[in-house]
Image (cartoon, helix red, strand yellow):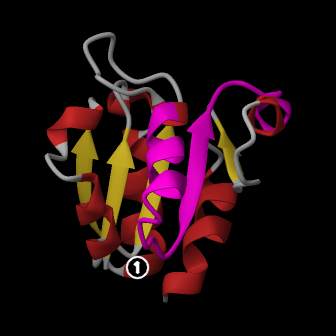
Amino acid sequence: MKILIFENEFFKVENAFNYVNERYFNGNLEFTILPKSQDLVNLSDMSKYDYIFLDISLAKKSDLDGFGILKKIEEENISIKKLTILTGNGDIKNKLRELGLKDYPVLLKPVVFSQLYDNLKSLS
C-alpha cells in the first residue's frame, strides 16, 4: 500500500509511522515523503496513492502550503482515495471552513500511535 506524506519535518513523526507500519502492517506500507509541493511534479499523481497525509505548514521553499494543495485538489477535482491533515494546529477545522474547503480528518502532532493506526486500518 502506497502512502504519500507531505511533511517538511518528517523526522518528528517518522517513529510513529515506522512503528505502526511494522506492528500492524508487517512493513507492507510504502512511504513517499515530500517536504515541498513541487516535489510531486504533477499533483494529479496523488491519485496513485492509497492514503495521503498532508501537513499544512510545508517547507518555506514550497510553492504551495497544505491549504494550497487542498485548493488544487478541489479545484482540479483530483481523485484521491483518503486524505488526512497532519498538523500541530488544533484549530485547523475552523481555518478549513474560513477558506471554504471541505472538512478533512485531522491527525494532530505529536502523533499518537493508536490514532495513526485508526487512520490507516481501513487499508488492511
Q: Quadrant of the image for the N terminus?
A: bottom left
Kind of residue indicated by mark 1: Phe
Where is residue 64? Give x, y as percent.
Answer: 37, 27
Asked if 63 appears above or below 94 in the picture, the reply is above
Q: Residue at x 72, y 53 (%)?
A: 102
Q: Which stretch did the figure color magenta?
A: 68-94
Rendered position, 31 above or below 92: below
- 122 and 73: which one is in front? 73
Horizontal placement of 17 versus 46: left or right?
right
Q: Nearer the viewer, residue 20 or 77?
A: 77
Residue reaching furthest top?
60
Q: Secondary structure at mark 1?
A: helix
User: Does residue 115 sit above or below 120 in this rendering?
Assistant: above
Residue visible at 49% across and 22% down in the picture: 57
Magenta segment includes 87: yes
- Whether residue 36 is visible here, answered yes or no, is yes
Q: Dividing the picture into quarters, in which one does residue 58 lie?
A: top left
Q: Which residue is found at the position 14% from the left and 46% from the top?
A: 41
Tag 1 residue: 25
Q: Position of residue 124 (x, y in %)?
A: 49, 89
Q: Is residue 27 visible?
A: no
| Farthest residue, direction front | 75
| In the rendered image, the vertical position of residue 119 relative to residue 14, given as above or below | below
Name the residue nearer the viewer: 100 or 36: 100
Question: Where is residue 75 drawn, in percent x and y?
Answer: 50, 53
| Label 1 crowd bin: few (<14), some (14–19), many (20+), radius 10 Å | some
Residue 111: x %, y % from top left: 60, 41
Q: Is residue 76 magenta?
A: yes
